[in-house]
Every structure is written in structure tokens, then in C-alpha cells.
Image (tube, rainbow, N blue to C red):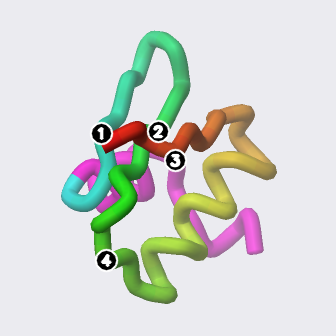
Amino acid sequence: MAKRHNQDNAVKSVARVCKVNVPAKSLQVSKGAIIGIKTWGKIDFLTHYCGWTLKPSAE
């Protein structure tokens, strides 16, 4: 799976749905966000293979 994704492209794609903090390597998802299956795959790639963290938003 890691061969299919590129970190830069995955971050750009996820930034459409989530708030991205690049220096801290964190993603913040709001409760009402609608996220598709491909975007979840990119989030999975970033969190499990690239060292990013996923934080739910309080909003």
C-alpha cells in the first residue's frame, strides 16, 4: 500500500477535508466532515506509514 501513495500528494488531497498542520505533522477532522473511502485510505497511509497523527476536532 505504501507504494501507491506519495506523502505530498496525500497531504494535498486530505487538506480539502481536514485541517493540516505540516510542521507538527497532525491532521484535525471536524465531527461533521464527510470523508470518502479513498481519503480514508490516504489518512491511513499518513498515520501508519509517515508518522502523522489524527486528532478529532471539538467542533
On the image, numbered disc 1 is attached to which residue? 19
Alpha carbon of mark 3 to alpha carbon of mark 2: how far? 13 Å
Q: Amino acid at mark 3?
A: Gln
Q: Nearer the viewer, mark 4 or mark 1?
A: 4
The segment highlighted magenta reads 1-15
| Nearer-N-terminus badge (2/1) | 1
Q: How many angstroms separate mark 4 from mark 3 (CA)? A: 22 Å
First in sequence: mark 3 vs mark 2: 3
What residue is disc 3 on?
7
Question: Which amino acid type is shown beneath numbered disc 2?
Answer: Leu
The part of the image, by quadrant, that contains residue 42 is bottom right
Give how far across and how far down residue 8 sits, in percent. Answer: 41, 44
Q: Quadrant of residue 14?
A: bottom left
Per the image, label 1 sits on a secondary structure element best described as strand
Q: Is residue 15 above or below residue 27?
A: below
Which quarter of the rendering shows the N terminus?
bottom right
